[in-house]
Image: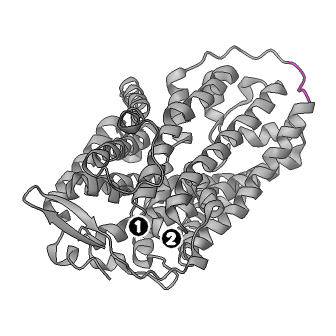
Amino acid sequence: METAKIGDSGCYIRITAMRKTPTGSSRKLGVLSLAAATYFMVSGGPYGLEELVQDSGYKLAFLILCITPLIWALPTGLMVGELSAALPEEGGFYVWVRRAMGPFWGFQEAWLSLVSSIFDMAIYPSLFVAYLGKLFPAVVDGRRGIVIAASMVLVCMLWNLFGAKAVGESSMVTGLLLLAPFALLTLFALVRHVAPTHPAAVHGNFLTALLVAMWNFMGWDNAATVANEVENPQRTYPRVMMLALAAIFLSYAVPLAAVWHARIPQDLWNNGSWASIAATVVGPWLGVVLVATAMVAEFSSFNSLVMSYSHLPVAMAEDGHLPRAFARKLKTGAPWVSIMVLGLAWGLSLGLNFDHLIMLDILLYGASLVLEFLALIVLRMREPDLPRPFRVPGGMPGAVLVGVGPTFLLIFALARNRTEQLDLGRWGSVSSLWFGVGLMALGVVYYVVAGRAKPAVGAARAE
C-alpha cells in the first residue's frame, strides 16, 4: 500500500497495490474462526451479566438485553460490516478514519484504542487469577497471583506468534468449552425450581444496568484490524458480524431466562455468582466447572484481543506514525515486534488498582466509535463509487441514521454518570470523565510532537 497527498488539503488516500503477504490462504481466518475470535473480543460468555441482574432485577435486565443489541450492537455491526468489506486492510478502523478524514484523525482513532487497551487488558489476567483463587486459594497467595497473571500474558503473546489462524481456531474450541456448561445449566434450570424465598425487593438502576449492557456488547470493530489475515474479507466480515451478534445475544439471554424460570432469588446475584447458581440448580461439581470455564473465557478474550490490537501499530508504522520496526512480521504473519511491545505494556499494568473502569472504557471506546460512524458517512459522500460488497441499508439516510442510536446512548450514559470516580490506588481518585478527556488530549499532544507521518516512511509503504 502507498499513501498519497491530495493537493494542499492535507487529506490522504490509500493507493491499493498488489502486496505480497506471508499468510497463505490455507492459513487465513474463515467465517467460523473469525466469528469465534470476534465472540471473545466482544463477549467472553455470560460472565459479566451478574452485575446487570443484581442492579436491575430479572425483568429490567432481560429488557435491556433485548434493547441494547438493537440500538447499540446491531448498528455498530452493520457499520463494521460495510467498512470492513469496502476497505479490508490491516489496521481496520484506523484505516477507515484515516482515509475518510486524514492522518490526524486516523492517529487519534488508533490512540484511543491503544491507550484504552492498557487498562482493559489488565482486567482479563486479573480475573483469571481471581477465578483460579476460588479453586486453589493457596496458589494465588501473595505475589504468586501477579506471576500467574504475567505468565498468562506471556503465553498469549507466544500463542499469537503462530499467527491469526492459530488464535481463531483455538477460539472455536474454547468457545465450545465455555458454552457447554451453560447449556447444561439451562437444561436443568428449565425443569427444576428452587424452593421459593422472599428476598428483599431490589429497585432497578436503569443507568448502571445500561452501562453494563453496553460494555457487554462492546468491541465489534476489533475484528477489523486483521483483515489481511481473513479469507475473502469482503464476504466474510458481514457474515461474521451477524453470526457473532446472534451467538452473543443467545449466550446471554437463554441462560438468564432459564435461571429466571428456575426462580433463583435476585439477591443471590453478585460478581461470580454463575458458579453458585450452577451449584444450586445442578450440583457443586457444575459450580467448579463454571469457575474453570470462566478462566478459559478470560484467557480466550485476552488472546483474541492480542491478535486484534497487535495489528494496529503495524498499519501506523507503515504510515510513518510509529517506528518502522513495528511493521516487522514472522512468516506466520504475526507482527512480533508489536506483540512484544504491547505485551510488555499490558504486563506492566497488571499491578495497577483501577476500579470502576466501565465508564472510562465506554468514554474512550465511544469516542473512537463516533469517529468510525463519521468515517462511514464521509466515505459515502467522498467516494460513492468505492466498491461496497455490503452496505448499510437505506442509502445515505441509512448511513447517517445507523450511528444515531449508539451516539445517543453514549452521550446519555456519560452525561448521567459523569460523577463516577476512578480509583488510582495510592494516588487517590479522580473523575473518570476528566481522566478520559486527559488521555484524549495526550493523543493530540503526542501527534503534534512526535506522531506526524514521516514522508520518507509513508512513501515507502509498498512492499
79 sits to left or right of 267: left
* Quarter of the rendering containing residue 160: bottom right
Point out the stretch of residues depicted in magenta: 192-196
Measuring from the top left, give residue 227's x and y in whole percent.
47, 65
Q: Badge 2 is on which residue?
A: 229
Query: Is 280 contained in the magenta span?
Result: no
Confirm or deny contact between disc 2 and disc 1 (CB under 8 A): yes
- Mark 2 is surrounded, within 10 Å at the Cα level, by few (under 14), some (14 to 19) or many (20 or more) other residues, namely many
**Mark 1 nearby-residue class (10 Å; few <14, some 14–19, many ≥20):** many
Identify the amino acid type marked 1: Glu
Please determine whether, in this image, residue 437 is positioned above or below residue 144.
above
Rendered location of residue 313, percent (x, y): 35, 67
Residue at 36% in and 25% down = 415
**Quadrant in the picture for the N terminus:** bottom left
Residue picked out by circle 1: 90
Disc on the earlier residue, 2 or 1: 1
74 or 235: nearer the viewer: 235
Residue at 90% across / 23% down in the picture?
A: 195
- The Cα atoms of the two marked residues, 2 and 1, are separated by 8 Å
Res 306 visible: no
Label ID, residue 342: none
Across and down, in percent, residue 315 comes to 34, 68
Give the position of the C terminus as an image quadrant.
bottom left
